[in-house]
Image: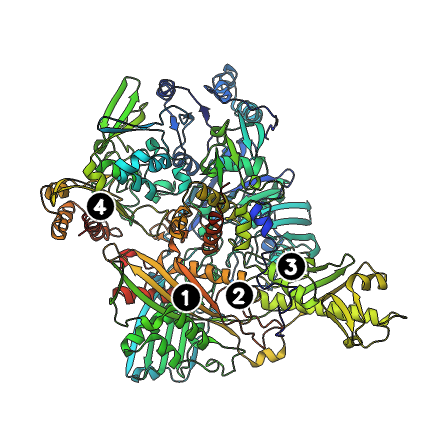
Amino acid sequence: MIAFDYVRPNSAKAAVDAITKDASAQFIAGGSNLVDLMKHGVVAPQKLVDISRLPLNSIEQSGNNIRIGALCLNSEVAEHALIKEKLPLLAQALNAGASPQIRNMATVGGNMLQRTRCTYFYDLAMPCNKRQPGSGCGALKGYNRMHAIFGASNSCIAVHPSDMCVALAALDATVIVAGSKGERKISFVDFHRLPGDTPEKDTHLQKGELITAVEIPVNDGFAKHSLYTKVRDRASYAFALVSVAAALDLQNNTIQHVRLAAGGVAHKPWRLMAAEKYLKGKSPTESNFKAAAEAAMSAAKGYGYNDFKLTLLPNTIIHTLKTIAGV
Amino acid sequence: MTNDNTQDKQEQPGELLETRRQFLKQSSAITAIALVAPALVDAAEKKLDEKAADIFEKVPLSIEINGKQHQLSVEPRVTLLDLLREQLHLTGSKKGCDYGQCGACTVHVNGKRVLSCLSLAVMQDGKKVTTIEGLATGSTLHPMQLAFIKHDGFQCGYCTPGQIMSAVACINEGHAGSDDEIREHMSGNLCRCGAYHNIVAAIREVNAKGGKS
Amino acid sequence: MGKFFERPLVPDDLDRVEGKEKVTGTASYAAEYDVPGVHYGVLVNSSIAKGKISTLNTREAERSPGVVAVVTHLNRPKIPFWDNPPEQQDNKRVEGQEFRVFFDDTIYFDRQPIALVIADTFERATYAASLVKATYKKESPSTNIKNNLDKALTAKQAQDYSRGDKDALKSAPVKIEAQYTTPFQVHNPMETHAATVVWDAPDKVTVYNKTQATKIAQQDIMRTFGLKAENVIVHSPYVGGAFGSSSRVWPEEMAALIGAKKSGKPVKVMLRRDEAFNMVGYRPTSVQRISIGAQSDGTMTGINHEAFGSTSQYEKFAERIVDPTKALYNCANVSTSYRLVPLDMSTPCWTRGPGETSGSFALESAVDELSYALKMDPLELRLKNFAEKDPDNGKPWSSNYLKECYESGAKKFGWKNRNPQPKSMQKDGWLLGMGMAAGIYHAGRSPATVSATLRSNGTLLVQTSVADTGPGSATIMTQIAAEAMSIDVRKVEFQWGHSTLPPAPGQFGSQTTASTGSGVYDAVKALQKKIAGMLSGKQGWAFSGLPVEDISFADEMIVDKNGDKVSYDDALKELSVKEIKAEFESKPTEEREQYSGYSFAAHFVEVLVHPETKMVKMNRVVCAVDAGRVINKKTAASQVYGSMVWGTGIALMEEGILDHRYGRYVNNDFANYHIPVNADICHVDVLFTDKPDPILDPMGAKGLGEIGLVGFAAAVANAVYHATGKRVRDLPITLDKLL
């Protein structure tokens, strides 16, 4: 690891200033992904701005929104009474991620900014457009079992590895960011981006911007009928092959509202809009769930090793919806 | 390489706005040297680098480890795990992967289990760290240590300190209610010898005896 | 024989003698010795799998702060055995030219070490290593076994085998034929390979390393550097898991030796996890074709087993992949062949249940397939073909309680409740499958030398160079010594894991208890004889002039046949000596040659398969094991639990994956190479027959470290087939293969 400077400003503003004036500086909070990337030499910031002690770690409800500070630990959010009651889907997704130790380190903001776990991205000897633009994509014709089936480009077929983000995408969260020009809000589904020709950019965050919180609208119907299903190669402590976050607002045997998102299938948490549209107003039956899953898959494309996801994802969608609806 | 000026008084962590390395980089002395002949730069840089790293690249770190206060000076790139193992010779915390994928380096920081391999030491300033070496009370082993021996919760012993630190936390967190819950909440600690069966037995027993710590 | 552990002096569930050190973090592993002035060596690895190094620029690394040396093939010190090799190269455990780190510019495998950067701190060495730049003349690597079967070679250790009529199965009324594959499996002990080297003098070195055999490490280092035995000191009392991967000296040890010599500093090198995948051995990948023919009553009439296993380009590594096929079933007509496919990878090495594990997956899957073809219960089929003597050589078994394993295992498991029809059983909405398989593993024994010393404080010191990488050998040796001496187990001090101690075989091949345990037993008996002789020879007291055989040792006393007794301490006082020491080399008896020695197991596995996602969950396991007399219930059960975890990994998730375009690993970390976590493991019942083997050794113990793994993966695969109707013949059984 390269030697770097370390600063620990005591305000969000000072932190933003510290990043803004130094091109190679990066924020560090939990460090559970950044330190790993630095050890691999994938990133080499010359300055780390430690934001871990900034007062951005409260969880509170105001009106119809729950606001979670960006520096709340994953474990704090997952164990918080308000989250367990109002946003059980988020708690489930968080607990499906990583390990208890990592959940005690990783923050909500940091989780959103996780880099892909694509093995070609991590290995400096391999081509990777995300790490080194223009070097090619090793995974496209290589070992791509973990890779995207939606929204990929010829430049990059990596997936976003987070579980938490899949739930946040499903729950219509909003990201609050502070920058040198003040605060702005980004809809969660627009926070991460597709790779296109510039896979080096994971999100729409601007240089110097600091995530301060996420806001999630509360829906009591969703709280009663939601489930996060994670399918992986072992029972725990593994990244998702696919995952599905689903929430149904069921009234009189009719799906009033539905939220569906998938993980492990795209460069960003993948909201399954077509399936949602199909299900809205319909009854919660297996055949409707199958049709919705089919609708969800219309734009999917396999790349060889990951072709199985074309079957696994719809199966997982159907299983998740059936379990929620009890059919 | 560690300046371990162990003191009783704990220094309060505060804002740290600029490291001395930054100061060095900006100092005119280096800029001036860069204008001299390459050979001379080489020699000067090499000599300077040696001293520079020791004097300028380190930042102060006040940290309590197993109840003992340490006033240290470390490079920001030193992880908590390497600080423990290589500078303080507390080798009980193990390096199994160094990338946060095995749990062998698990320690408690301010009472919570974390991975020391992904924790920068400098970020632990002002915090309390407990490692496997600090778990026993004098010569009296912690109930979890005794249970691991009784139930043969290890073979080679390499993942064991991490397992035990994690096991103690697992109970403290209230995640030892059933075998399934223990298994899930101990899944961040890999054991290649395959002692999982016995690890669960040890935790089950300590939990049943109300073995909070 | 047969009296073991009947006395209260030696509990048969003794806690591990090194337990306290391990649970308090005070046990020191190879990279944890506080060596004054130690420097850190970090390897630089090739970015190609095959070719030559064109340029190697170390200038920037050398200038980097704290760096004392950068060692490469261009500047390494002369190494006697490499630079002036003797004409006759003996002491080869594999055929071919062993890998020599930093020898020249040739690259044989991905991430081959090309430089060692040595600096005063780990961080500085690591950073400086990133500054070493190499360019290469690349060649196209071959790492895919399936594309290279036509290049297969024969090896000395892998001769074709045939008994009876090779074509017998052609006319069998019921016949199955199938191809099975097993992937690269990497040992991945939790401690990565490490060595700390101190050159005490130009011709004298101390190495703290990670080895299953301090004596092998010592000999390899002596040979390579032309040193005397007494000048090579190898310490390895604590080994953080090995499973076969520390059965020879590897590049990180050699690099530390060379680096320490070059730099004049003590040097420690600890591999990163990613480096441990293709440098320190692994289980070779295999392609196997099996055909079995049977009469309609299930009698096997012919088995053909053709296996291909991978090796490196520079060594032929052969394992025992077809051995279970030769001995497990009473079949008159059996033929096997085993060929090695050289790939552009490092050399594989012994991996827990070496050969037998991969081979038994194919054999025991095929037997299951045969049972369906016969419409016969797979347990009944196995009983039908039970071999009453070793069908390979006609010798009687030294002991064989496999039938008892089948019966006790089936009973405990509830095998009779199984509906034979695939896809017929369910639990909580999941598909339920039950499968079983048998295991067989050679029970061997090698010479071992042990010393036993009775000391004036009444304690017994027992010493031998054997390793304890986790099986509990130190504990078992302590028990055996206490039992043989008739002394409280707490008064036994056992020392192990140093090359300076009397020579014991390496801790592999499930032979430690039989070999070194016999050594301990015999050394104690030799000590007793010596004490008796001295007592008899001393004039003027109760024991004077008594025949030695009339003096016995019981309940911590020395007793003559008249009932006169003297305590061990008093005996030493009487003899005016501080201690009495005996050393003994224990060897297998000639009688042993008349018998065929094996451990046996029967595995019963229940899996649940999710109907939609096809995730496979282990639900219940029963392992019934015949490993002879169990010396320590606790550590013995742990060996089988561990095998079950290994078997689960092999069956369901473990697979070393290379991108064959580059010949480079793409899952060489614990995030992508999955080994089972706690949540993957289900309840296991371990049943031991616990009946002594009367031939192999004085304790009646057979090997236990590997038998629990042999056949296990097949039992899982057979259960998955029973649950789903899908026969997966290519391990691991990941869910994509079931969709």
Residue for badge 4: A149
Q: Is residue B15 visible?
A: yes
Q: Is residue C708 visible?
A: no
CA–CA distance in space, label 2 to label 4: 46 Å
CA–CA distance in space, label 1 to label 2: 23 Å
Closer-to-camera residue (C221/C730): C730
Q: Is disc 1 in the same subunit as disc 2?
A: yes
* Residue type pointed to by label 4: Ile
Q: Position of residue A58 (x, y in %)?
A: 34, 27
**Which of marks 2 and 3 precedes in the sequence?**
3
CA–CA distance in space, label 3 to label 2: 17 Å
* Secondary structure type for disc 2: loop
Closer-to-camera residue (A136/B134): B134
Residue for badge 1: C622
Q: Residue at x 46, y 81 (%)?
A: C391
* Residue type pointed to by label 2: Gly
* On screen, residue A216 above or below C369: above
Dot 3 falls on which chain?
Answer: C
* On screen, residue A206 above or below C187: above
